[in-house]
Amino acid sequence: MIKFKVGGRSVRPENIAGALMQSVVEEVANAMRERLEAVRLPATGEFPTVVVHGDRLDNLSFSVEGSPELLALVKQRFAAEELENMTFASTVGSTSPRAFLSYAREDRQLAEQVAAALQANGIDTWWAGWCIGAGDSLRQKIDEGLADCTHFLVLLTPASITKPWVNQEMDAGLVRKLNENTRFIAVRSGLAASALPPLLAGMLSPSIDDFDADVRQLVNDIHGILRKPPLGAPPLSVPAIETGYSPAATAVAKVFVEASETAMFGDPQLTVQELATQTALSEDDVRDALHELQAYFTVSFDRALPKDELFVAFDKHFTTSDPAADALTLARDIVNDESFPGNTAEIGERYGWTPRRLNPAVAYLINRNLVMDSKALGTHPWITAWVQKKTDATRRFVKSRS
């Protein structure tokens, strides 16, 4: 029998056309991946991570992950027609609020209490008492605090309302509100709302009368916690979270995440009808959701088989673990610990992680070409038998995320 080899693999004569096409797809995907992974943010040295989706030239696409600054650089480096086949995901979450607190010297004690309460509740607070030290330039330090704040707070009391210094800081805060989308909050203590200057009269100005209750409300307002009562359950079993996908697609993904025992390909396999029953969606809505999530599923004869990247993308929304964070932990140990095991079962034992938790973390690294893995069969319940020791890609990934 005549034997052929394509890409180093033996291929039967009747399968040569398919093997040649697969080889072409892999070459195109690898070439684009290499170009994307070569982009580096000069200020931090960060490289992007890349996920390849699709198995044909007509459905090949790339997910690029990195900081907003790095993603902007990638968009500059590639042509418009290339960007059409890319999606971008920021690895940087929203930052915590940063407050600048202006006050008069006479109100120092109350200002310190307010600043401490804000700081203790996740609001990074600029307060002169701990931000200005001996020998510091007052103007420079105040400018730094103003430039970095998301919320400008001024403590208005009978003592502070007429202070020139406080009024100058208020002027700066109002300019930031107008030009840079900084929220301006005038906090009153012992001062009637009618005593506010005309420019502030039209703003909601909370008063501190009951310190604990009123500061708690101030904290909630800064964090954007609504005073409205929570919404009731929607008519569909749609998760009340933001995933970047439609509610129907999110509901479908949730079913698979919660039902899977291993987070591997095809675990579980569900028909469109079964998904419709479990999500209270119509079958047409389920099909549309699967079309939206086509990068994460193989659908055959109305049966949906999840790919491992589905769990990478959605576990953080519906489980107690985040595969991206777990992958970084794993990659750091691979890079830093020469004795770190390569056997997947041993890795799971070291971390105390079940296959359901470890597999998405390993899939994250494999799908982004950050580690080498075993292609052997029969590794169930693990996604692979072993993970190779560190590579240059692993090192760059750890360095970029550190």
Image: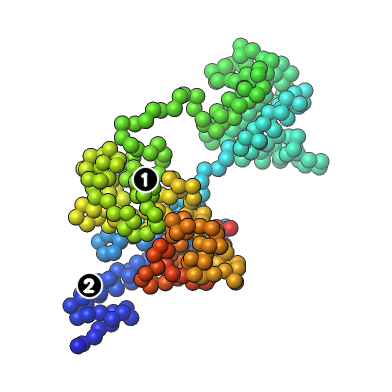
Residue 220 point in image, percent of width and height: 56, 29
Q: Amino acid at mark 2?
A: Gly
Q: Which residue is mark 2?
A: 18
In the displayed structure image, the side of residue 259 where residue 343 appears, left or right: right
In the displayed structure image, the side of residue 248 where residue 48 appears, left or right: right
Q: Quadrant of the N terminus?
A: bottom left
Residue 312 point in image, percent of width and height: 42, 55
Kindly identify the residue that appears in the image at 63 percent across and 25 percent down: 215
> Can residue 210 be spotted in the picture?
yes
Q: Quadrant of the C terminus?
A: bottom right
Residue 239 point in image, percent of width and height: 38, 39
Q: Which mark is residue 254?
A: 1
Q: Amino acid at mark 1?
A: Lys
Residue at the right extreme of this rendering: 134
In the displayed structure image, the side of residue 288 where residue 337 appears, left or right: right
> Can residue 35 be spotted in the picture?
no
Check disc 1 and report its element: helix, strand or loop: helix
Residue 135 point in image, percent of width and height: 81, 42
Check disc 2 and report its element: helix, strand or loop: helix
Quarter holding residue 310: bottom left
Query: What's the colour scheme?
Result: rainbow
Kindly identify the residue that appears in the image at 29 percent across and 69 percent down: 25
Residue at the bottom extreme of this rendering: 1
- Alpha carbon of mark 1 to alpha carbon of mark 2: how far? 34 Å
